[in-house]
Amino acid sequence: MKMIWAVVRPEMVDRVVGALGDEGYAAVTRFDVYGRGKQKGVEVHGLNYDVPKTMLMMVLEDERVEEAVRIIKDHAKTGNIGDGRIFVASIEEAHTIRTGEMGL
């Protein structure tokens, strides 16, 4: 199992989540985040401020990761600085609280 964290522009979220849903990736968690990457935030009157972004999180089978990453890249890209980042990490276990089942 792998976990994907994708940090994307808030205005691109519906497009990305819609495309993932169209390809059968139903389980996506999203939350609003603030931060700064290589662009060092937004400068206002000489001060740098964090930029609003949206974090998408999903856990899926290893064989589905490459396609999910491609979908996110294709639908989140504007070609401008600040389009976001995608992180992929291994997940050792997943448990369903209600049923006690292990795995996805």
Image: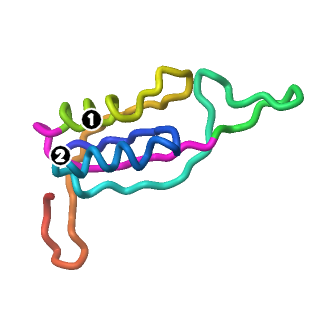
Color style of the picture: rainbow
Near-viewer residue (99 or 25)? 25
Residue 15 at x, y = what percent? 38, 44
Residue 99 at x, y = what percent? 16, 77
Report if the CB atoms under discs 2 and 1 are less than 8 Å apart: yes
Q: Residue pushed farthest bottom?
A: 98
Q: Residue pushed farthest right?
A: 45
Residue 46 at x, y = what percent? 87, 26
Q: Which residue is mark 1?
A: 71
Relative to 100, is 34 above or below?
A: above
Disc marking residue 12: none
Q: Magenta region: which residues?
A: 52-64
Neighbor class of circle 1 (other Cα within 10 Å; few <14, some 14-19, many 20+) is some
Q: In the displayed structure, does residue 68 sit left or right of residue 44?
A: left
Q: Which residue is mark 2?
A: 23
| Residue at x 43% of width, y 46% of height | 13
Q: In the displayed structure, does residue 5 sit left or right of residue 54?
A: left
Relative to 57, is 62 above or below?
A: above
Neighbor class of circle 2 (other Cα within 10 Å; few <14, some 14-19, many 20+) is few
Residue 25 at x, y = what percent? 21, 51
